[in-house]
Image: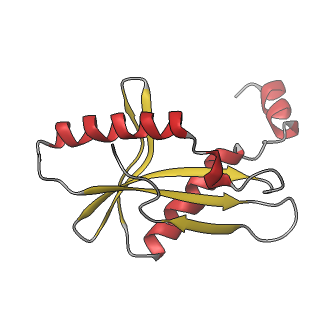
Amino acid sequence: MIPWLDRLRARVRHAPPPLGWQGEDLAARFLLHKRYIILARNVHIGRYEIDIVARDGDTTVFVEVKTRRNDIFATPDQNVDARKRKKLIIAARHYAAMEDNPNMYYRFDIVSVLIPPEGRPSITIHKDAFKTQ
């Protein structure tokens, strides 16, 4: 419609999506391949966020996705510290309360995604990565 705007758009290069988004997409596809049923992604409960909520059989799974370019200093799952675990537990309890199912069985999985600059991504799932207190 506006010729100069069209020329400008044609010259603008689109940046790839942020690394975290790429990792979450890969993790979701990986979970589907493992026969999980994805219920929701990026669930915001107050100031907390759950990356992926899924079902694995009769278990609701709260999945934290950690994506990195390399694991020189720590593997992605090692970056889920006690503070992050506490936030996930609070968010999961609120989610369970919203579902109005007090007997809902749930667990926490961590999906580690390594996306190196060269080569193929690697994905590792850590089932039942931590327990609630």
Do we see residue 22 in this rendering? no
Of 86 and 70, which appears nearest the observer?
Answer: 86
Q: Residue furthest front?
A: 133
Question: What colour scheme governs how the chains and residues are painted in the rendered image of this protein?
Answer: secondary structure
Q: Name the quadrant containing residue 6.
A: top right
Q: Name the quadrant containing residue 72.
A: bottom right
- x 62%, y 47%: residue: 21
Rendered-image quadrant of the N terminus: top right
- x 34%, y 34%: residue: 90
Q: Position of residue 73 (x, y in %)?
A: 81, 50
Rendered-image quadrant of the C terminus: top left
Does residue 129 sit above or below 36 in this rendering? above
Q: Position of residue 86 (x, y in %)?
A: 43, 35
Q: Name the quadrant containing residue 60.
A: bottom left
Q: Is residue 17 left or right of residue 106?
A: right
Q: Is residue 89 left or right of residue 99?
A: right
Q: Position of residue 77 (x, y in %)?
A: 61, 54
Q: Position of residue 3 (x, y in %)?
A: 80, 28
Do we see residue 35 in this rendering? yes
Q: Is residue 12 left or right of residue 80?
A: right
